[in-house]
Image (tube, helix red, strand yellow):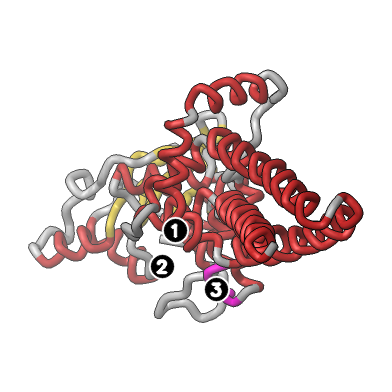
Amino acid sequence: MAISMVELLVTAGVFVLASGLMALIEAAVLSVTQVEAETMVQRGLRGARQLLQIKSRLTSAVVVMVVFTNVINILGPVLVGAIAVELFGSTVLGVITAILTFATIVFSEIIPKSLGTHYATRISRLVAPGLRVLTMVFLPIVWLFERLTGALKKGERRMGTEDQIRSLVRLGHSAGYIETDETQMVQRVFGLNDRTAGDLMTRMDHVAVIRSGSTVEDAIAVVIDAGFSRFPVISPTGSVIGLLLSRDLLSASKLGGGESTLAQLVRPPLFVDVSVRADDLLVLFRAKKSHMAFVQERGRDVGIVTLEDVLEEIVGEIHDEKDDGRATPPG
């Protein structure tokens, strides 16, 4: 009888531990996000690459975990019940079942799943290599259940959307992991594609310009009066024909060209439509190595937009040494 009692306790203990282990693994693998898995891969952590592969085909891993969990949860009580009946008779089966149910709930569900969720990143990458091997070993079963579940799936679950990332940033800020200014910057970056060149531009009637027939000295006078570094050059009809940098003017003046015309100093203009999005403007400025573009609407010059205008949408208002609180056109 002593041996039978030991068998009963060992069988029940093994069942509870095995069931708890599967619950721990399942909670960890399902709780860790793909973003966390990719981060661990970048950090070169052991098992991270296998974990990322599991997350990319999560159904396969779920099939293996469900099969093992159910085999344990079915076989365990059957064996424990058979030993208990042989040892004590069928009258104690209800008591054994109640005790086993309580132990399963506490030690095979609540505690393991709580720990698995809390230590998800660590546990999931440690079990990932073994779980990956099991999915390959049980490939026929995995393939069958993937086809069955695939027939029931409709549509696509969207991951990594703008709204999800915004929410993640807010959660990170609330938890103290992301600073307030970082949070604001990320939120503003996502707002770039909601703003257009027309929203950011300074209208032409508020912009200091240099006329095409001006001499270098005339242009320098405009530069000194306005205090900007870039100026539109306009034709007699008022159309933009080029861009002039104040440093080019100063260099020409230093070389003795004060009375010459501006033709050799004018740079080709960069034109954009009024509807161009701010994020596209940022890419365009980088590609063209330019800090200013001329905004057109139906072929007519209506304003200027600068790299600073776009950056201010991300980091907030940028002031330099000449700013005194008054509204001034960029340049």
Disc sitting over residue 177 in the figure: 3
What residue appears at the point 55 percent right and 60 percent down from the top-left corner? 120
Instruction: Report the front residue among 323 and 254.
Output: 323
Examine the structure image and report whether residue 115 is included in the region drawn in magenta: no
Considering the numbered disc 1 on the image, is that residue within a helix, a strand or a loop? loop
Q: Which circle's residue, 2 or 1, is located before the other in the chain?
A: 1
Q: Which circle's residue, 1 or 3, is located before the other in the chain?
A: 3
Segment colored magenta: 176-183
Q: Residues within 10 Å of mark 3 (few under 14, many from 20)?
A: few
Q: Which residue is mark 2?
A: 226
Q: Amino acid at mark 3?
A: Tyr
What residue appears at the point 55 percent right and 79 percent down from the top-left corner? 325
To which quarter of the image does residue 193 belong?
Answer: top right
Q: Do the residues bearing badges 1 and 3 touch, measured as CB atoms within 8 Å?
A: no
Q: Residues within 10 Å of mark 2 (few under 14, many from 20)?
A: some
Instruction: Report the front residue among 94 and 227.
Output: 94
Instruction: Report the front residue among 285 and 218.
Output: 285
Q: Nearer the viewer, mark 3 or mark 2?
A: 3
Q: Do the residues bearing badges 2 and 1 touch, measured as CB atoms within 8 Å?
A: yes
What residue appears at the point 44 percent right and 60 percent down from the top-left corner? 308
x and y, in percent, of residue 36 in the image: 49, 56
Q: Which residue is mark 1?
A: 208
Q: Quadrant of the N terminus?
A: bottom right
Q: How many marks?
A: 3
Q: Amino acid at mark 2?
A: Ala
**C-alpha gap between disc 2 and disc 1:** 7 Å
Q: Do the residues bearing badges 3 and 2 touch, measured as CB atoms within 8 Å?
A: no
